[in-house]
Image (tube, grey):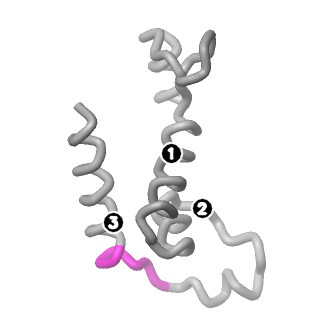
Amino acid sequence: MVLTSFLLRAGAHSDIPGRTATAHGFRSSFRDWCSEQGYDRDLAERSLAHTVKNKVEAAYHRTDPLEKRRPLMQAWADYLASLM
């Protein structure tokens, strides 16, 4: 993964001593934040572009909730900016 390779080269540190940050860690942090903020689980999963493994459920996921994802992603961006 390009982001993980960059993080390794940059020596980006994890919260865990001796470990390097990873792209998966960013995704996991986003998912946890969504849950803590009360965002719908399905919306968070779809924002991460996760595929639905259940074939029946996947059949009903025909639309892209872009208009619902925009405010979520803006709130995430605002949260990240507040940490700087």
Which one is in front in this view, the residue at disc 2 or the one at disc 1? 1
The residue singled out by tag 1 in the image is: 29
Q: Position of residue 52 (x, y in %)?
A: 68, 71
Q: Secondary structure at mark 3?
A: helix
Label 2, secondary structure: give it: loop
Q: Give the tally of numbered discs.
A: 3
Q: In the picture, residue 24 is in which quadrant?
A: top right
Secondary structure state at the residue bearing disc 1:
helix
The quadrant of the rendering that contains the C terminus is: top left
Which one is in front, 26 or 39? Answer: 39
Q: Residue at x 22, y 41 (%)?
A: 81
Hey, what amino acid is under mark 1? Ser
Pointer 2 and pointer 3: residues touching (CB < 8 Å)? no
From the top left corner, tell me how far across and down residue 43 is, in percent.
48, 73
Residue drawn at x 60%, y 13% is: 17
Q: Nearer the viewer, residue 18 or 45?
A: 18
First along the sequence among labels 2 and 1: 1
Residue 25 inside the magenta-drawn segment: no
- Examine the rendered structure and indicate whether residue 43 appears above or below residue 11: below
